[in-house]
Amino acid sequence: MKTQFAYETVVGLKVKNEDLYSDYRKAMTPLLKKYGGGFRYDFKIQETLISEDPKQINRVFLIFFKNKESKETFFADPEYLKIRETYFTPSVESTTILSEYDRFQ
């Protein structure tokens, strides 16, 4: 069996416009796949019991890439930045990076 690596980030968001955020996900997913990325988990949450960050969270997801460089290239892509400005920025109040790590698959 071939061992593969992935670079994963666990993210918490405070989504303030679900419809617009859904449009963001639809628009960015093909580009995300082009960079070898995807989502492993995605949760809508109602209550946070403990948090080191004062920002509220109502969405938690795990996004992955084949490595950290792929992640950085994706988030710097001009096409992604346009999608982000159009959909993500007006639909998300805050972002909290909960964890980032390399993972053996």
Image (cartoon, helix red, strand yellow):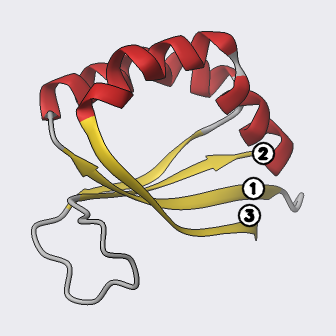
Can you tell which of label 2 and label 3 is closer to the viewer?
2
* Residue 1 can be seen, yes or no: yes
Residue at coordinates 44% horizontally, 19% vertically from top-left? 85
**In the rendered image, which residue does mark 1 sit on?**
6
Residues at circles 1 and 3 in contact by the CB criterion of under 8 Å: yes
Q: Nearer the viewer, residue 52 or 62?
A: 52
**Would you call the spot at circle 1 few (<14 residues within 10 Å), some (14-19), or many (20 or more)?**
some
Q: Secondary structure at mark 1?
A: strand
Check disc 3 and give the amino acid type: Gln
Report whether 33 appears left or right of 66.
left
Which label was assigned to residue 97?
none
Can you tell which of label 1 and label 3 is closer to the viewer?
1
Q: Quadrant of the C terminus?
A: bottom right
**In the rendered image, which residue does mark 2 sit on?**
66
Check disc 1 and give the amino acid type: Ala
Report whether 36 appears left or right of 98.
right
**In the rendered image, which residue does mark 3 sit on?**
105
Q: Secondary structure at mark 2?
A: loop
- The vertical placement of 9 against 36, above or below, is below
Report whether 15 appears left or right of 61.
left
Using the numbered discs, state the Cα–Cα distance from disc 2 to disc 1 in whole angstroms.
Answer: 5 Å
Report whether 44 appears left or right of 27.
left
Q: Secondary structure at mark 3?
A: loop
Q: Furthest-right residue in view?
A: 2
Mark with earlier residue (1, 3): 1
| Residue 3 image offset from top left, x and y in percent | 87, 62
| Residue 9 image offset from top left, x and y in percent | 59, 59
Residues at circles 2 and 1 in contact by the CB criterion of under 8 Å: yes
Mark with earlier residue (2, 1): 1
